[in-house]
Image (cartoon, coloured by chain):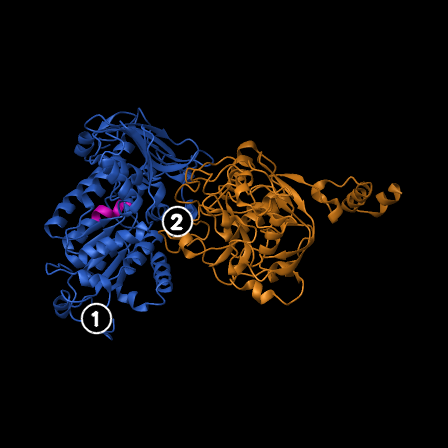
Amino acid sequence: MLSVCRHSLSMQGKFTFLAAILFSVSMVSAEEAKTEKEMKPYTEKILNTDVTFDMVPIPGGEYMMGSPASEKNHEKDEGPQIKVKIEPFWMGKHEVTWNEYDIWSFNLDIQRRKLLRGKFDEKEKAADAVTRPTKPYTDMTFDMGHDGYPAICMTQLAAKTYCKWLSEKTGHYYRLPTEAEWEYACRAGTKTAYSFGDNAANLDDYAWHYANCNDSYQKVGQKKPNPWGLYDIHGNVSEWVLDQYIPDAYKKWSGKGTLKFPVNVPTTLYPRVARGGSWDDEPEALRSANRIASSADWKIQDPQIPQSIWYHTDAIMVGFRVVRPLTVPTAEERKKYGLDPAIPADEGR
Amino acid sequence: MTQSNNQSTSRRDFLKVTTATAVGTGILSTLGSTAHVHASGDDTIKVGLVGCGGRGTGAASQALSTKGNVKLEAMADAFKDRMDSSLSNLQKQFSGRPERVDVAEDKMFVGFDAYQKLLDSGVDVVILATPPGFRPIHFEAAVNKGVHIFMEKPVATDVTGVKKVLEAAKKAKEKKLAVGVGLQRHHQAPYIETIQRLKDGAIGDITSMRCYWNSGGVWEPRLAREDAKSEMEYQMRNWYYYNWLCGDHINEQHIHNIDVCNWLKDDFPVKAYGMGGRQVRTDKKYGEIYDHFAVEFVYADDTRMYSQCRHIRNCWNSVTEHAQGTKGSCDISGAKYETTGGYKWKYRGKKTNPYQVEHDDLFAAIYNGTPYNEAEYGAKSTMTSILGRLATYSGKPVTWDEAMASEVSLMPSDFSWEGTPVTVPDENGFYPIPTPGVSEVLKKA
C-alpha cells in the first residue's frame, strides 16, 4: 500500500497520510486533539524561549449564567440567569504570567533568536509580523514581582493581540474567553457563589484577595484550583474577557431559549468586562457571577494624548487567561464575534 | 472666540465681580484683588503649546481641563506632522467644548524658531514640552516675553542649560510670573502626605534614601537613518537617544525619583559617584545613551541617596523611592512606612490624577496672582540628574560646584536642518560613547 502511495502522493500528501495512520492508532498528542474525547491537559512551549504554559480541557455543556437574586451580594447586572450552551475548549491553567507576556511585549523571543541563532521558520515569521506594543514609559509590574506573577495593566486590545501572536507562534488558535465561557469555566459545574461553595470564609484556601494579599498580586498557582483545575480563577487578578460590558445584557438575552455562543461584541472602548475579582477586591467581587466594567479611569494617569492603546496606568488589578476552542473559528466567525484584535489605524503616531 | 455668554465678560467687569459670587466657573470666585493675570482683554487665558508630541498634547489637554476660561490658541513644533496630529487629537478630546481649542492657521508655527513666533503671537500661558534640550532657550524667551509657563521636566540636558534656567527663574520671580514644572509627584496627594510625615519625623532622622527607575526602556527609534534628510532631523526624530536633546535616561526619567529624594531632604547633593554603561542596547540606532546607571549621591550632611536606573528588558523593574530613618523605614512611592516599634502607616486618602492637579494648581495661582515658581527646584533636580550622568560617564567623583563651574555645552551652534549636532556618527553609523576612566566631561574638548 505504501509503495502505491509513493507513486501517487506528493511528499506533503504522504506525510498527511502517514500522520492519519498514526492518529488512527491513537497516537494523537494531547494538544492535537480533534474530538472532545481526545482533549487532555497539555503543556505548550513558546518557541525560542524556555517558557511554557499549561492548558486544561473544559468540557462542552450547558449552564445557567449569572446569579439568582437570592445569592448574597447578588447585583442587578448578574440577572436574570440565562441558559447557555458552551462548546468544548482548553483554558489556561493559570493567568498569563509576565514570563509569557513579556516575550511578546518586549520581543524577548526575537532577541534570543538572534543571540542564539535560533530557528526562523514560517511560524516565527508570522509571529514577528503581529504588532507588538510600544514599550511602556514606566515599570508595569509596579514592583510587585515579575517571574511567576500574573501580567497586569494591559488593555483588552493588548490581551487580544497577545493571543493573536501566541496563535501564530504556536500554530494553535488562542483567544480571550467570552464572558459566558469564562463564567462556565469558573463555575466548573457548580451553582454556588464561588466554585468551592457559598462560604466566603473559605476564600483564603482558593484565592488572593484584599485581606490576605499584603497589597500585592501573588505568584500564580499557590492556592487550590477549582473543580476543573483552574488556579486563581477567583482573585489574584481580574481577567479580561471579550465582551463589551452591558449592564442589562442578560435581560436582553433572557427568554430566547438556550443561547449558543453569546457575546457582546465591543462597539465602544469603555466599558468592557473583566471577571473574577482581584487581590485588590473584597470577597463579593470574587464571586463566579460578578462582573467588572472597565472605565477611562483605568488610564487616568497616562499623561499622553493620544493615550496608549496598550497600557493602563491604573488597572494594576487586571490580567487575563487564554482559551483555545476545540473547533477553530472561521474567518467569518472571527469577524462576526469580534475575536480578532482591531488596532486603530492611527496607532504609532 | 465668540462672546456669547456672560462668562466672557471683559477683564474689568471680571475683576469687579470676583469679590462677590463665582462667575460661572468655580475657580474664578477665588480671584483676589491682587490678581496678576494676563494681558488679554477678558478673563480668557490664552494658551500656547510649544512641542506637540504625546506629552505636550497631554499637557495642553490638562491645561484646558482646568476650571477657568482657558483656550488653546497657538501651537509650535519643529515638525508640521506632529503639530497636525496633536491638533486633531485635541479637537477630538474637546469635541464637547470646541471653543477651548481655537487655533487659527496663522497661529501654527513650524521650525526651530516657531517658539519665538508663538510667544510673539500674544499668548498668556505657554506650555513648553519639546525634548528637554530646548527648554532653557524656550524658558528664557518665555520669561523675557512675560508669559506664565508650564514646562515639562527635565528643564535642561547640560550644565549650561541649567544655569540659563536658574537665571531666567530669578527673572520670572521678579516679574511675578507663575511657573509650573512637570514633576507631578509634588502634586500627588499620597506623596505630599508621606513626605510631610517624614519631615515631621515619622521615622526619625533620615539616614539614607534609595530610588529607582528600572524599566524595559522607552520607544524604539522612530526614523531610520536612510529616511532622514539630515543628521539633525535624524537626531530630532529619535531624540531620546541623543544627549543634547534628552540628557540620557537618568535625566529624562529618573529625575522624578531623584527629585523626590531631594524634596524629602530639602536639599541637593554636593557630590556624586557613579557607574554605568551600554551593556545590551548597543546597536547604532540607539545613538549615544547608556542603558544603566548606578549613582551614589552625597548631601552636605553626608547623607546618601542611592540611585539606579536601567533600560534593559527582562530584569528586575522598579520605579520607586524609599527612605531609611533612625526610627523606621518608608516606601515613599507606596506611601507607607513602618517604625522599628512596629507601627505601620499607609496612605488611605483620595487619589487624584497628579497630571491634572499640577495644572489645576498652576492655573489657580495664575488666576489668584499668588506667587508660584517651581523653576528653581526643577532646575536643581535636573542638575542632580546631570551630576549623576557626569560622574557615571567620567567614572570619577564630581562635585556640584565643579560641575556648575563647567562651561561644556551639548547644544549645537546652528539650529537648522543643515546644522551639525555636537556628536555625529562615524562612517559606520556609530556614535562616540562616553567611556568611564577616559572621557572628560567637565572640560571643553
User: Closest to the observer: A31 or B343?
Assistant: B343
Q: Give the chain letter for orange.
A: A
- Residue B135 within the magenta-colored segment of the rendering: yes
Q: Are discs 1 and 2 located on one and the same chain?
A: yes
> What percent of the width, then of the height, locates residue A116?
56, 32
Chain to which mark 2 belongs: B
Is B413 drawn above or below residue A328 in the view shown? above
Residue for badge 2: B228
Quarter of the image that includes the N terminus of chain B: bottom left
Horizontal arrangement in the rendering, residue B23 relative to residue A130 (left or right): left
Residue B211, located in which quarter of the rendered image?
Answer: top left
Overall secondary structure of the magenta stretch?
Answer: helix
Tell me the magenta residue range.
B132-137
Q: Is residue A50 left or right of residue A2?
A: left
- Residue positioned 25% across, 36% down in the render: B198
Q: Colour of chain B?
A: blue
Among numbered discs 1 and 2, the one appearing first in the sequence: 1
The residue nearer to you, when weighing A29 against B340, is B340
Q: Is residue A174 visible?
A: no
Is A153 situated left or right of A173 in this image? left
Please report, as a chain letter, where disc 1 is located: B
Q: Label 1, on which residue? A: B8
In the picture, measured across the screen, residue B374 lies left or right of residue A3, that is: left
**Residue at image location 30% in from the left, 47% down from the top:** B131
Q: Amino acid at mark 1?
A: Ser
Q: Is residue B248 above or below residue A349?
A: above
Give the Cα separation between the discs numbered 1 and 2: 47 Å
